[in-house]
């Protein structure tokens, strides 16, 4: 706990057996109350490794996609009474050592959501981010900042912390089950007026770290542009999209 706030870490997993243990062992358990892993029908022994480590484990019998995985993660964390939920990929691309810093920014009332940014500082390219992904990240982030009227260093990190209120109030079920779920969620947070903070985060790109391929990256990029345009059209009152309607 931090400031009497119960903290849960959720691990949306797919074929993470090789990196799960090293990720799990760096979690700061002196502050974290629950760890939840949702295995999205992995083809390796991710679930077996998780259970051996004593992690609360949920297994999807069929692959529901990255967004569908997160929906299960957040619902489970809320059911367990979490006040703050930190979403961390179990592929060891991001260091779990930042969990305390991210959660504390919410626990003490400064922000409603916190992102671990690979772009703040010099972490992204130094950590091995492919150059084309870095360029796409910068372009999409600039476009989104303009369309959403907000300012973030990046919208595409997979390391995030949220208050209970955000997870209860946002219409997350209206979002995609694919990778663009992440981006839709941030657009919703901005739409409903919640405060977003950022911390600088080193990142590691290596063989066993998860990374979507070029084709999926293009699909994700198109989804990001679509979400930003939807946001602007809704702000102008020209359309009414279901992802921007209150529960």
Image (cartoon, rainbow, N blue to C red):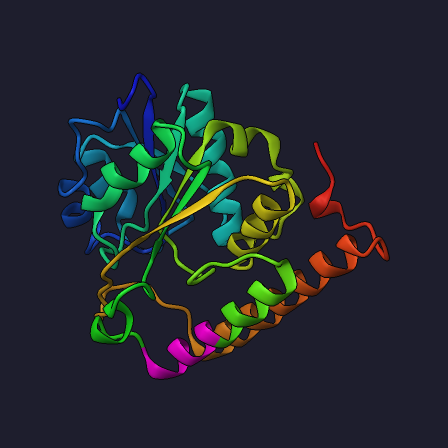
The image quadrant that residue 43 belongs to is bottom left
Residue 159 at least partly seen: yes
Residue 121 at x, y percent in the picture: 26, 66
Residue at the extreme bottom: 132
Q: Is residue 219 above or below residue 179?
A: below
Instruction: Specify whether 24 is left or right of 46.
Output: left
Q: Residue at x 57, y 44 (%)?
A: 189
Q: Is residue 134 magenta?
A: yes
The image quadrant that residue 149 belongs to is bottom right
Residue 235 at x, y percent in the picture: 76, 53
Instruction: Specify whether 238 is left or right of 20.
Output: right
Q: Residue at x 44, y 28 (%)?
A: 76
Residue at the extreme right: 238
Instruction: Specify whether 4 is left or right of 141.
Output: left
Q: Is residue 231 above or below residue 163?
A: below
Numbered range of the magenta stretch: 130-138
Q: Is residue 184 above or below residue 53?
A: below
Q: Residue at x 46, y 36 (%)?
A: 112
Q: Residue at x 15, y 26 (%)?
A: 30
Residue 247 at x, y percent in the picture: 70, 32
How many tags in the picture?
A: 0
167 and 151: which one is in front?
Answer: 151
Quadrant holding the N terminus: top left
Residue 5 at x, y percent in the picture: 34, 21
Q: Is residue 38 above or below residue 18?
A: above
Q: Is residue 216 magenta?
A: no
Residue 48 at least partly seen: no
Classified by dominant secondary structure, the portion drawn in magenta counts as helix
148 and 76: which one is in front?
Answer: 148
């Amino acid at each position: 706990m931090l400031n009497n706030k119960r903290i849960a870490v959720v691990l949306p997993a797919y074929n993470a057996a090789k990196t799960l243990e090293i990720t799990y062992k760096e979690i700061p358990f002196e502050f974290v109350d629950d760890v939840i892993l949702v295995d999205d029908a992995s083809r390796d022994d991710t679930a077996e490794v998780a259970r051996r480590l004593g992690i609360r484990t949920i297994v999807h019998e069929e692959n529901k996609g990255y967004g569908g995985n997160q929906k299960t993660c957040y619902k489970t964390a809320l059911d367990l009474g979490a006040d703050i939920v930190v979403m961390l990929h179990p592929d060891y691309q991001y260091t779990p050592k930042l969990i305390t810093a991210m959660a504390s920014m919410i626990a003490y009332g400064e922000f409603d959501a916190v992102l671990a940014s690979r772009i703040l500082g010099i972490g992204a390219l130094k950590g091995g981010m492919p150059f084309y992904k870095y360029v796409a990240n910068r372009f999409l982030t600039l476009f989104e900042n303009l369309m959403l009227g907000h300012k973030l260093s990046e919208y595409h990190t997979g390391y995030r912390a949220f208050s209970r209120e955000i997870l209860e109030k946002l219409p997350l079920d209206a979002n995609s089950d694919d990778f663009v779920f992440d981006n839709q969620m941030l657009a919703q947070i901005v739409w409903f007026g919640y405060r977003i903070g950022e911390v600088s985060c080193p990142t590691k790109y290596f063989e066993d770290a998860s990374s979507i391929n070029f084709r999926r990256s293009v699909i994700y990029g198109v989804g990001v542009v679509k979400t930003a345009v939807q946001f602007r059209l809704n702000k102008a009152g020209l359309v009414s999209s279901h992802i921007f309607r209150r529960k």
